[in-house]
Amino acid sequence: MTLRREETVSIPESDLEGVSVDTLAVRAGQVRTDQLEHGDAIFPTSSFVYGSAAQAAARFSGEEPGNIYSRFTNPTVQAFEARIAAMEGGERAVATASGMAAILSTCMALLKSGDHVICSRGVFGTTNVLFQKYLARFGVETSFVTLTDMAGWEAAIRPHTRLIFIETPSNPLCEVADMTALAALAKASDALFVVDNCFCTPVLQRPFEFGADIVIHSATKYLDGQGRCLGGVVIGSNKLMEEVYGFLRSAGPTLSPFNAWVFLKGLETLPIRMRAHCENALELAHWLEQQPGVTEVFYAGLSDHPQHELAKRQQSGFGGVLSFRVEGGKEGAWAFIDATRMISITANLGDVKTTITHPGTTTHGRLSPEDKALAGISDDLVRLSVGIESVADLKNDLNRGLAALAGLR
Ligand SMILES: *Cc1c(COP(=O)(O)O)cnc(C)c1O
């Protein structure tokens, strides 16, 4: 690879061919202006001007490429799109105002009334609401299947199944889907296979390598990683993304240039952050397994996890989220959470700060008791999104939770 030191130019895509995701995270997609800035420029503008009426006409007709209005394109947003597309290994990315806007735009662009969706059970709560409450009103019906139940996926297929939607690993139980098998099923059924890759990011898992048609992110989580901005992105073939882009341009949930700029900065440190998240989470998972009061730990990095081998094939790390069950039911779980001092009690995840959540009464609180049981959301379950603080300090704080459990005995 030769990195050119020419005048203005950004690094041509061909020069970045074959480089690792760590390098793409720092280098891909930057477009330098004639100021030769080293950092990424930010373009906080709603619209763009033209040299002449004829040029304006040419831009609007599509004869001449170029920016018109930031609901359509914006250079900072395009830089973020190019970088994340390169990292995932997809042809094109379309950025959105939030992760939910990414999921909605994908569905609105690619589904129509009468189509059927199969979604893994226990996906992000709002994703569930979007499918069950809103898309259902427009004649798109959704079936839910346990992520690891391959026979269940096959049985759920209907003639009009057009989309298979999963998150892997799952939230909060860290179950792992066999993406190759699901991609084959989708292909045989003429359905699109969509993976919400929010938990792993392209640093740990690249779903296109396992047959995904579309990859979605809530950039709000690890891509930012420091809890500053909301955003999302959809990645896939030029053909599919042209449809998603078309919807976005008409409906308007576009990403702001400021947020795109924050995400560009976030991506630069994503590889080293993800490695730190994984290292801390693995150590805490092993440690929690040995603690009295903790009855079960869910983390794909543990060798007794049912999909440990599959996770090793699909992921280069096991991620930053783990969950565990404690003695004492809901009372035990709440006492554990309330006894921690440093760790933040919040339902957010993917932050450099460690967060702790009781899924049963927050993120998954709207599920019916039956759905909770099917998704494995028990009252004694606690979820930890492990940050990058010192693992010794995290253990000290979690020890306060363990002491509270002992106090209940
Ligand atoms: C947070 C999250 C979303 C939604 O993203 P927003 O940016 O909050 O809209 C979607 N999927 C997963 C897995 C998430 O964790």
Image: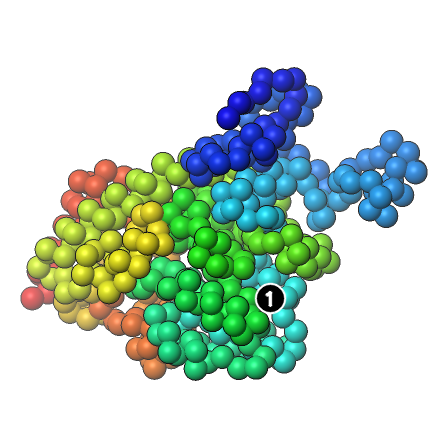
Q: In terms of secondary structure, where does tag 1 sit?
A: helix
Residue 16 horizontal/vertical position (percent): 53, 32
Q: Quadrant of the C terminus?
A: bottom left
* Residue located at (63% from left, 41% from top): 78
Which quadrant would residue 11 be assigned to in this image?
top right
* Residue located at (87% from left, 42% from top): 58
* Res. 257 in view: no
15 and 60: which is toward the camera:
15
327 and 147: which is toward the camera:
147
71 and 194: which is toward the camera:
194
The residue labelled by disc 1 is 107
- Three-letter amino acid code at disc 1? Cys
Q: Is residue 209 left or right of residue 286?
A: right
* Residue located at (58% from left, 33% from top): 14
Which quadrant would residue 182 be assigned to in this image?
bottom left
Residue 305 horizontal/vertical position (percent): 22, 61
Q: Is residue 67 left or right of residue 24?
A: right
Up-down relation of residue 115 to residue 346 (above or below): below
Up-down relation of residue 260 to residue 340 (above or below): above
* Residue located at (25% from left, 43% from top): 279
Residue 351 horizontal/vertical position (percent): 38, 46
Mark 1, Cα crowd under 10 Å, few <14 / some 14-19 / many 20+, is some
Residue 72 horizontal/vertical position (percent): 72, 48
Q: Is residue 144 left or right of residue 361?
A: right
Q: Is residue 102 left or right of residue 46?
A: left
